[in-house]
């Protein structure tokens, strides 16, 4: 019983962190209808940025100051990376394919996204080597911290999307790009902003994750990234509450799987859930099913 | 237009078949004799296997315009199935050294097993994801390939009973080395490997230039328009996906039991890197072009080999011992990824686009020139 409760608490904290990463997938998909495979690598880069910043700020002496400044710095760096990726890899494709419906228009961005992901992962491998870097331990109660920070962030994000002009522009963009442009929305800027916010959230998630799990390594994006992605699809890709719900479910499910004797089967279970969801409710739990127009 | 000698269609087919499969027969006899270095033989056969992988992925990624990023999963399934069947048959036939006579039984059985298992997985993966619009196939194939690998690596090796026990017999992370643990019997000689590669290339060629291929292209260009003229999207997409899985299964099966192979199947041979290599092969050559897939496969095979050779050089080793960060394989992936991104931005159709440069469809009588 105690074990079960523990698993639920740990799962919720894990889920909150996964939700932060899932939001990045969800927002970009909502705006561009693109699976941004590079997002998981932005998450990983955020972890490394946090690692170097926390150490540079002398984490152990002023834990709170170092954590806040380090996290904000990592978020800023990740946001810059996200915008850079968008600018270099995705924008040229958009400009080229505009007004043209040639065959592989749908596959091209996916290949590019995959390419960026592989590129970033291997650059990290070269720059930071494959060795695990142990994170400075600053706090005792990281789980509670993760949980609180995530909830606050979700609230702020919900405000941003539903109560500000920028948020309205984002929603307009996701409904119809051309119409949004005609209404005076600067689509390029809004897309860059979406990438920046999503990447910043991923970095926040990665620093929190590393403070809890204490290690950073170049392939960490694969593990957490896929879980976050599944969470986004599970909750309904493009929906913010959906990402949070999906993250929570994946987190709890993963911890419950650890209680059984097949502790390594956590990710198998995650993918199994994904396939079942796609079979039963393809738009995800909170996603909207829209009919496709000709 | 130069009128060639008049040959009847039946004779032309026969000639073509001889041209395609003759080299495979010749190599069966000659490869061991002419190429003394077994690592070179291994390289050539690996190239043929990569050609199969690329040609089969080309059906779904190139012709059908879908995006599968878990091809390694199907290759892996084929490899494991074939390794199990081959090693058990080997024991049933009395063991000893693999002989050519035995290979006539073992190889078809193993390849059939690998292809069947992979195709079955193709149906299971393809049906739910190809019914949907959007990029679900990409997600699900990625998930499937990872699941395949994780199931194998994460099973507790001391499990004795049930499903876990059966999977534990496959050796987990260490890999499966035959029923007796002495290595998978390596039956598939050049005849089988090159023969299968030629068959798969010819088959995908026939698909491309048939009504089926045209239907796929129509679907890729405009799904709604295609379905309005009677092309059932789900049926065509799922079937072509299963064809791709079948080809991957054959490739995997042969890679497991290939002569001069390593005699062990490990989960890590089939990780995401293989899927990405396969995508690189298809995209580089031009998605939809069979010539492109073959050229891409050869290119990737030989760059991998070059890096392996470079890693053996003393100068490189010395440099690496001083600069521990230099991971040549990571460097290769950085290079591939950059090339892929640049290609997508500058020339998304790849090297050849959809064309078949060496085999431009000429009027009757003109023989196809050259060989890939």
Image (cartoon, coloured by chain):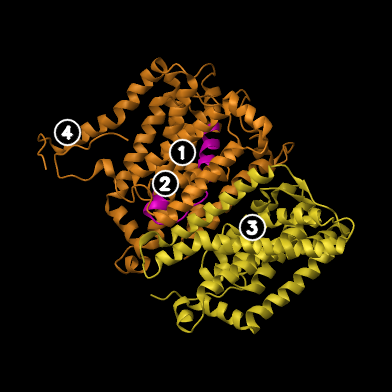
Chain colours: A yellow, B orange
- Determine contact: label 2, label 1, CB under 8 Å: yes
> What quarter of the picture does the C terminus of chain B occupy?
top left
* Image disc number at residue B87: none
The x, y position of residue B111, in whole percent, is: 46, 34
Q: Identify the subunit bearing mark 4.
A: B
Task: Tell me which numbered mark, 4 or 2, is placed earlier along the sequence.
Answer: 4
* Image disc number at residue B284: 2
Q: Is residue B254 visible?
A: yes
Residue tagged by mark 4?
B11
Numbered disc 3: secondary structure: helix
Work out how far the residue at label 2 is from the one at label 1, CA to CA, in angstroms. 10 Å
State the residue in front, A274 or A88.
Answer: A88
Residue bounds of the magenta highlight:
B59-83
Q: Residue at x 31, y 65 (%)?
A: B230
Residue tagged by mark 1?
B300
Does the magenta-highlighted stretch encompass residue B101?
Answer: no
Can marks 2 and 1 be said to lie on one chain?
yes
Can marks 4 and 3 be said to lie on one chain?
no
């Amino acid at each position: 019983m105690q074990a079960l409760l523990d698993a639920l608490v740990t799962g919720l904290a894990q889920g909150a962190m996964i939700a932060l990463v899932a939001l990045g997938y969800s927002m970009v998909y909502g705006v561009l209808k693109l699976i941004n495979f590079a997002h998981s690598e932005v998450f990983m880069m955020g972890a490394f940025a946090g690692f170097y910043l926390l150490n540079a700020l002398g984490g152990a002496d002023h834990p709170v100051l170092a954590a806040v400044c380090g996290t904000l710095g990592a978020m800023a760096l990740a946001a810059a990376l996200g915008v850079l990726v968008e600018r270099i890899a995705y924008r040229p494709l958009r400009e080229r394919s505009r007004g043209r419906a040639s065959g592989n228009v749908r596959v091209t961005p996916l290949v590019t996204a995959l390419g960026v992901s592989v590129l970033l992962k291997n650059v990290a491998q070269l720059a930071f080597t494959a060795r695990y870097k142990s994170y400075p331990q600053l706090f005792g109660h990281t789980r509670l911290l993760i949980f609180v920070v995530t909830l606050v962030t979700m609230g702020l994000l919900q405000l941003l999307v539903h109560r500000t002009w920028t948020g309205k522009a984002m929603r307009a963009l996701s409904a119809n790009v051309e119409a949004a442009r005609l209404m005076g929305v600067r689509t390029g800027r809004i897309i860059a902003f979406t990438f920046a916010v999503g990447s910043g959230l991923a970095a926040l998630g990665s620093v929190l994750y590393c403070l809890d799990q204490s290690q950073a390594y170049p392939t960490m994006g694969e593990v957490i990234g896929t879980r976050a992605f599944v969470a986004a699809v599970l909750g309904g890709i493009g929906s913010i509450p959906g990402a949070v719900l999906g993250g929570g479910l994946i987190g709890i499910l993963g911890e419950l799987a650890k209680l059984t004797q097949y502790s390594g089967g956590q990710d198998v279970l995650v993918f199994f859930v994904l396939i079942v969801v796609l079979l039963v409710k393809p738009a995800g739990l909170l996603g909207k099913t829209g009919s496709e127009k000709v | 237009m130069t009128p060639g000698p008049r040959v009847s269609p039946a004779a032309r087919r026969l000639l073509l078949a001889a041209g395609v499969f003759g080299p495979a027969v010749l190599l069966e006899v000659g490869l061991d004799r002419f190429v003394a270095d077994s690592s070179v033989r291994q390289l050539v056969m690996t190239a043929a296997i990569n050609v199969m992988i690329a040609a089969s992925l080309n059906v779904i990624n190139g012709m059908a315009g879908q995006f599968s990023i878990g091809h390694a999963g199907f290759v892996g399934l084929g490899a494991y199935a074939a390794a199990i069947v081959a090693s058990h048959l080997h024991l049933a036939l009395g063991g000893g050294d693999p002989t050519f006579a035995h290979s006539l039984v073992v190889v078809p059985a193993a390849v059939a097993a690998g292809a069947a298992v992979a195709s079955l997985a193709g149906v299971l993966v393809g049906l739910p994801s190809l019914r949907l619009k959007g990029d679900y196939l990409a997600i699900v194939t990625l998930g499937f390939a990872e699941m395949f690998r994780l199931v194998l690596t994460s099973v507790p090796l001391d499990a004795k009973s049930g499903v876990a026990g059966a999977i534990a017999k496959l050796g987990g992370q260490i890999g499966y080395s035959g029923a007796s643990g002495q290595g998978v019997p390596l039956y598939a000689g050049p005849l089988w490997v090159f023969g299968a590669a030629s068959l798969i290339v010819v088959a995908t060629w026939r698909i491309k230039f048939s009504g089926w291929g045209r239907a796929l292209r129509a679907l890729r260009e405009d799904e709604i328009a295609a379905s309005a003229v009677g092309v059932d999207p789900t049926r065509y997409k799922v079937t072509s996906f299963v064809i791709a899985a079948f080809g991957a299964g054959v490739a995997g099966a042969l890679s497991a039991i290939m002569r001069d192979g390593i005699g062990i199947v490990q989960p890590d041979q089939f990780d995401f890197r293989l899927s990405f290599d396969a995508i690189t092969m298809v995209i580089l050559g031009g998605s939809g072009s069979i010539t492109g897939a073959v050229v891409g496969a050869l290119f990737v095979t030989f760059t991998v080999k070059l890096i392996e050779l470079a890693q053996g050089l003393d100068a490189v080793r010395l440099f690496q011992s001083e600069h521990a960060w230099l991971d040549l394989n990571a460097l290769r992936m950085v290079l591939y990824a950059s090339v892929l991104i640049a290609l997508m931005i500058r020339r998304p159709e790849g090297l050849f686009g959809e064309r078949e440069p060496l085999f431009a469809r000429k009027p009757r009588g003109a023989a196809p020139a050259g060989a890939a």
